[in-house]
Image (cartoon, helix red, strand yellow):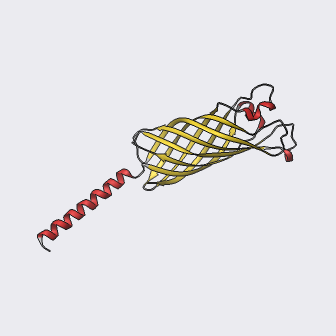
Amino acid sequence: MTRRGIRLAALALGLGVAGTAMAQDKQGDVNIFVDGGIGGYTGDLGELSATGPTWGATLSLQPNKVLGFEMGYEGSKNDVTDDRFRAAEAPSFIRHGATTLLKISPPFEQIRPFVGAGLGVSYVYVRGGSGDTYTSDLMEEVPLAAGIEFNAGALTAGIRGTWRVLVDDNFADAAVSDDASGALVDGSLTVGGRF
């Protein structure tokens, strides 16, 4: 091999190593994951409904090692336990919502605890015969989250808990003597990919 050939091979090798290192530094800037767990309402709303399944899908952006931003879809189903309904005829609260979350974490890579706060909006659909007791409604939320993520190469997994302060929960106002109060609490497992 000529000197020129050796130089070109060394340059190609160097560019390949640099490109791989840059790709490894960039891996994890974008995470896409799904989650599933259990959740329920607290306060007046908790007295009227049971714990039920939750699910979702999230896009997470990590512009640096400390600050992250999430946007995603969240859903849940909670059966009504109100004594005014027979069990077979009781309605369910079906929630479909969009959430944004600003996350802060220490600059760790493989095991990353985090806390976060954001804004959300959900549509609560009352499925089943409820008469005028419950009405489908749009509600605003302030999600507060904490959890831990485990990252390994292109994979991510985690566990998290979220407390959603409900700014508007009018879907149950007619069921109680005055304004219904409560929050929405859930715990979930997440799994997805890093890019």
Residue 6 as seen in the image, left or right of residue 13: left
Quadrant the C terminus occupies? bottom left
* Vertical relation: 157 (above or below) 14: above
In the picture provided, is 40 more to the left or to the right than 58?
right
- Between residue 145 and residue 58, name the one nearer to us: 58
Q: Is residue 135 left or right of residue 97?
A: right
- Residue found at x 50% / y 36%: 115
Q: Is residue 56 above or below residue 85?
A: below
How far across and how far down the image is residue 124, in percent? 71, 41
How many marks do you count on the picture? 0
**Residue 34: percent from left, percent from top:** 57, 52
Q: Position of residue 169 (x, y in %)?
A: 70, 33
In the picture as drawn, the residue positioned furthest to the top comes out as 178
Image x and y of residue 149, in percent? 49, 46
The structure residue drawn at horizontal position 45% and vertical position 43%, both measured from the top left corner, is 112
Q: Quadrant of the N terminus?
A: bottom left
Q: Is residue 6 above or below residue 33?
A: below
- Identity of the residue furthest to the bottom in this view: 1
> Relative to residue 59, is residue 137 drawn left or right?
right
